[in-house]
Amino acid sequence: MSNNPFKTFIELHLIQNFVPANLNRDDTGSPKDCEFGGYRRARISSQALKRAIRTSRRFTVMTGVDNGTHSKWLNRQIINALIKSGKIQKDDTENAQKITIEFVKRYDKKINTKSGQTSVLIFFSKDEKDAIVNTFVDNWANIMADNQDGKAALEKLAKTIAKNTTNAPDIALFGRMLAGKVEFNTDAACQVSHAISTHRVTMEMDYYTAVEELPQDDETGAAMVGFTAFNSACFYRYCRIDWEQLKKNLDNDSEIAQRTTRAFLRSAIDAIPTGKQNAFAAQNPTSFALAVVRRDGMCWNLANAFETPVQAKQGNGYTSESIVKLDALWGALAGFYDDSDIAALSAYSTEITPSQLKHLGTAIQTSVSEWLKPIKNALMEG
């Protein structure tokens, strides 16, 4: 156990530039945006980014543990397992439906008592879902008979799951909440900001047409016309992991917490939302990544480096200018907070050389493997 009275945080700062795209739409179908520093900025929601991270194949491979599942149909999972095991027949599920719905009410009292659909998405790990399903299958006779053994099995199951810990890395990172069942809640160990463009943006429109390829002789013109909104932007992204909370959520399993952190960092630099990708193919990798392990309980979101929008200079786009501005704010903060306890600092850039960075140049690594090493070592020491 560390004697440090402050919390340990892992921070991630990213600069990522995208070609014309519509990665994250609002209710009108337009790319999300916001105002910052008095200027309109492109925006990607934290929800879109978190989903891109947790659903990436690399995340699951690096953690070695199955992700959790969001679903309103826990009841359906139980019913299907009972049918598959031969405990009930597919055309005779009425009694099972009533019993399983009563059980799922433990997690959502507002469940639809006819369909079994919960009013909210419930976030379960694979082990938790399997435990629920297997308990019903293994104890079905007692549960159907409504005897004490069946009730005891369900009570034990409910208490086991409602323990505020999990082995699912994504649940441990992003948490889960059920307003009506607080003992089931898990406080998130990770904060993810909305990505915003480092510069002012204007919305653009794509006018497109489709051609009728089997026309009649007298038919001319387009068979379909439409509009798609898009923009092109260089984004600043920020994430923060509370190391102690992550370990707590994972039942103090430091090894899984280490793997989860590395998987998150590695997947975050690859994360790209899927919106309108078939139309725009905006598969642009991160241009700059700064990972920090700090033991002083502080946190620095560096978005204010871009409160005054970046201007594209002649011969330069937004990306390199954004990296330089981020470097400048980091240097200013690090200079003032001279009591900061930075345990590790690791950066990489595909757009700028170390000599162009006054403050972070010495932290630049040459590969993603080398970039992860200082973070791994600092967490192992801590």
Image (cartoon, grey):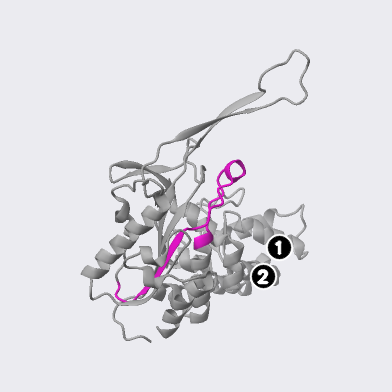
Identity of the amino acid at label 1?
Ala
Distance from label 2 to label 1 (Cα)?
8 Å
> At which x and y percent is residue 262?
50, 72
Q: Mark 1 Cα within 10 Å, few/some/many (few <14, many 20+)?
A: some
Residue at left 35%, top 58%?
324
Disc marking residue 301: none
Residue at 49 percent across and 48 percent down: it is 18
- Residue depicted at x 61% and y 48%: 114
Residue 311's spot in the image, x, y percent?
Answer: 34, 46
Q: Quadrant of residue 211?
A: top right
Segment tinted magenta in the rendering: 269-297
Label 2 crowd (10 A; few <14 / some 14-19 / many >=20): some
Question: In the displayed structure, does residue 342 sit left or right of residue 86?
Answer: left
Quadrant for the C terminus, please.
bottom left
Q: Quadrant of the N terminus?
A: bottom left
Q: Which residue is mark 1?
A: 81
The answer to whether 37 appears left or right of 265 in the picture is left
> Residue 96 occupies which quadrant of the picture?
bottom right
- Dot 2 falls on a residue whose secondary structure is helix
Three-letter amino acid code at the position of disc 2: Asn
Residue drawn at (40%, 42%), measured in percent from left and top? Answer: 33
Q: Is residue 92 left or right of residue 16?
A: right
Residue 304 visible somewhere in the drawing: yes
Q: Circle 1 — which element? A: helix
Query: Does 206 sit left or right of 360 as displayed?
Result: right
Q: How many marks?
A: 2
Residue that numbered label 2 is attached to: 134
In depth, the one of 375 and 150 nearer the eye is 375
Q: Position of residue 220 (x, y in %)?
A: 70, 16
**Does the residue at mark 2 contact the one at mark 1 (Cβ under 8 Å)?**
yes
